[in-house]
Image (cartoon, rainbow, N blue to C red):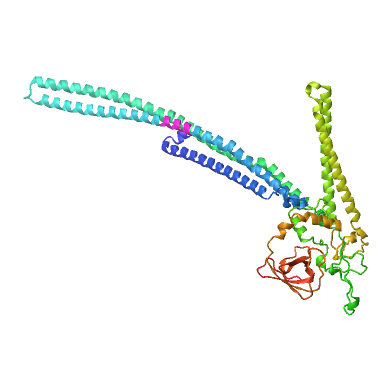
Amino acid sequence: MSWGTELWDQFDNLEKHTQGGIDILEKYIKFVKERTEIEISYAKQLRNLSKKYQPKRNSKEEEEYKYTSCKAFISTLNEMNDYAGQHEVISENMTSQITVELTRYVQELKQERKSHFHDGRKAQQHIETCWKQLESSKRRFERDCKEADRAQQYFEKMDADINVTKADVEKARQQAQLRHQMAEDSKADYSATLQKFNHEQHEHYYTHIPNIFQKIQEMEERRIVRIGESMKTYAEVDRQVIPIIGKCLDGIAKAAESIDQKNDSQLVIEAYKSGFEPPGDIEFEDYTQPMKRTISETSLSNSRGDSKTELKFSSKSKGKLWPFIKKNKLSLKLGAGPEDFSNLPPEQRRKKLQQKVDELNKEIQKEMDQRDAITKMKDVYVKNPQMGDPGSLDHKLIEVGQNIEKLRLEVQKFEAWLTEVEGRLPVRGEQARRQSGMYEAQTTPSVNNCAQDRESPDGSYTEEQSQENELKMMATEFDDEFDDEEPLPTIGTCKALYTFEGQNEGTISIAEGEILYVIEEDKGDGWTRIRRNEDEEGYVPTSYVEVYLDKNAKGAMTYI
């Protein structure tokens, strides 16, 4: 099966066919190139997606990623980043192993094809030239034969005419002989030219053209093999990254399996546990005996030595912190929290103090490592004075020693606060457990006296007098600024359901049935900020008022 023998007369069609093969190859190169661009774009989008959902450093969002579900999400983002990298590998390998190689091969193929068809055209031109020579020789032979016939007829005519002189007859005879000889010569030339043409034609169709067409056939078959190999490479490039992509997907599945809902629930407890005891039952107030009416805890009377039973606020206030005074609230918002974290609930305060102690111990260890390194360097200088002056390190040792001493004092201070907090934390009985879809109430031991002294009437946490004084001192520097601030706009009204004696700083007294203005909603601490007039405003327990927010106010709702 050879193009030279089977397609000896299809030169033009072979030229079109081979050009079409090159076009297909160039189209495949373009296809692979666009695939690599898609892979690069896809990888870039995956990386941007992974980066977009990574938690920001030193933000509140980062703190949420301590839970196993969030850690699994981070692992998924990291695995997707590696997944994107494999698509970049696909693009790079396809570019280097297919696009670049095929582009170079196409250039070589075009040059080879051009050379083969140039030889074919050259052979065609040669055989066409031989054919023209044969035609010319044939026409000359034909012409000479006709001329010889005419000369012979003229001679015969002259010879038969009795009126023609003998000289004219002889002249006609010589002319006829000459023309006959010329015809013979043309015949011999035509015969030789014909033999030469037949030989050239045989060589053309049985040697030259078959050789040229065979080379073109081999070239075309190499092109077909090459595009097939490129397609295999195309599949192999994808197949090579499948194991790594599989590992990425396995990593995502493993991260999902590592999610522990119980552990996350425990972390929520550790993050938000206040350490307070739930409030006890509210005692009955007998209004039929006004003279013997007990002083309700809602009066916020601070007579801690009073033996009268105190009432607890409603369940909405359970576990809430006793609100700070107005100025202290503002100062804390500005980041001016107390050093001993006394503004936090006991359990959270304990965690913060423990964290601070751990950080200080790490700093102490770092300073001690630095001191050891300087000491070793000094010993080297003592043994080898040419390396340096040992005395030049003395001031550094003194500085490091002072830093260690300062840090130790800080540790002692925070450890003292930590011991104080741990001594005042209430010891709870066995925790309530959920059984058969219900919570069994467990009895709790009484809270120690020191914790009770620091407990507000609703069971939330208040500071001792010294800590209140400290907060007041902290707020002093902000007094002028906040005293001059413009009054907050009213966002609704409220009606006092009960009488409240606001004796603590920052609170305001109200009478049952009184209508007042609301200027700040309950922020979750159980207190609502109200105003009676331009000079009188403060906080009251949310459970003591019925709030009517304006419809235009954000998150308008009624508290009862």
Q: How many marks?
A: 0
Q: Is residue 128 left or right of residue 166?
A: right
Would you identify the image quadrant in which residue 174 lies?
top left
Q: Give coordinates of residue 220: x percent, y percent.
A: 50, 35
Q: Main secondary structure of the magenta part?
A: helix
Q: Is residue 21 above or below residue 416?
A: above
Q: Residue sitting at 88 percent across and 53 percent down? A: 421
Q: Nearer the viewer, residue 17 or 324?
A: 324
Question: In the figure, is residue 112 to the left or right of 390?
Answer: left
Residue at the outermost bottom position: 288
Q: Is residue 517 magenta?
A: no
Q: Residue at x 14, y 22 (%)?
A: 172
Residue 243, position as x, y percentages in the image = 70, 42
Question: Picture quarter containing residue 283?
Answer: bottom right
Residue 115 within the segment the image draws in magenta? yes
Q: Quadrant of the C terminus?
A: bottom right
Q: Would residue 458 appear left or right of 51 to someone viewing this image?
A: right
Q: Nearer the viewer, residue 276 or 251?
A: 276
Looking at the rendering, the stretch of residues picked out in magenta corresponds to: 110-120
Q: Would residue 343 be seen by someone viewing this image from the given angle?
A: no
Q: Looking at this view, is 175 or 533 the one in front?
A: 533
- Measuring from the top left, give residue 541's x and y in whole percent: 79, 67
The percent coordinates of residue 14 (x first, y second) are 45, 37
Q: Is residue 405 visible?
A: yes
Q: Residue at x 67, y 48 (%)?
A: 50
Classify 168 as above or below 226. above
